[in-house]
Amino acid sequence: MLQKITGAPGVTTITPYDIPGSTQPRHVTERMKIEEFIEGEPHELSYIRSRLRTVCEDFYRKADPGLFGEAATLDQIIRTLNDAQDDHPFKGAFEELKDINAYSRVENHAEIDSDPYGDTNPDELRGFCSLVLGLTRGM
């Protein structure tokens, strides 16, 4: 498949169209941005921080849609895991998901007074990125 690209007024080129790259699900492209950030590519810190939450939400929704539902927020996923049987396969992620929720909420909700994660430190963000990637392997 081909696409037309306009780069300057009056200039159009025909190039191959990357169908797989253009049609990847949102959670895959967002997870890739997190991986790129860890590898040193520059990304807006607030964007990456907010993706921690959405990547986790997408992963757990798809991994067990009967338990979490299509629109479950990270907070709802955490509450559901809190009530789940101890032998549920995702129960071991409970504490880490709570930490990710606390860390990423500042980018997704109103400011919280005395929030320990109010400022985004790049090294701390990389640590949370690694945690999210570890929890969402197999996407």
Image (spheres, grey):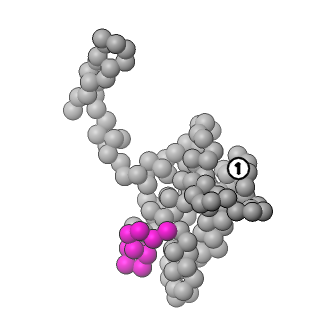
Q: Residue at x 55, y 42 (%)?
A: 36
Number of numbered callouts drawn: 1
User: Where residue 14 appears, x then y in whole percent?
Assistant: 26, 21
Binning the other alpha carbons within 10 Å of mark 1 as few (below 14), some (14 to 19) or many (20 upward) gives some
The picture quadrant where one finds residue 16 is top left
> Is 89 placed left or right of 95 in the picture?
left
User: Where residue 32 appears, x then y in whole percent?
Assistant: 49, 47
Can residue 63 be seen here? The reply is no
> Camera-side residue: 71 or 19?
71
> Camera-side residue: 7 or 106?
106
User: Where the C terminus falls, by quadrant?
Assistant: bottom left
Q: Is residue 12 above or below residue 119?
A: above
Can residue 126 be seen here? The reply is yes
Q: Is residue 18 above or below residue 82?
A: above
Q: Amino acid at mark 1?
A: Thr
Residue occupied by mark 1: 120
Predominant secondary structure, magenta span: loop
- In the picture as drawn, the residue positioned furthest to the left comes out as 1
User: Where residue 81 appears, x then y in whole percent?
Assistant: 54, 80
User: Residue 45 lies in magenta, yes or no?
Assistant: no
Q: Residue at x 55, y 64 (%)?
A: 135
> Is 7 placed left or right of 37 in the picture?
left
Q: Residue at x 50, y 58 (%)?
A: 55
Magenta-drawn segment: 64-73
User: Residue 71 lies in magenta, yes or no?
Assistant: yes
The picture quadrant where one finds residue 15 is top left
User: Where the N terminus falls, by quadrant?
Assistant: top left
- In the picture as drawn, the residue positioned furthest to the top comes out as 10
Give the secondary structure at mark 1: loop
User: Where residue 53 appears, x then y in whole percent?
Assistant: 55, 60
> Is 18 placed left or right of 31 in the picture?
left
Q: Residue at x 64, y 73 (%)?
A: 95
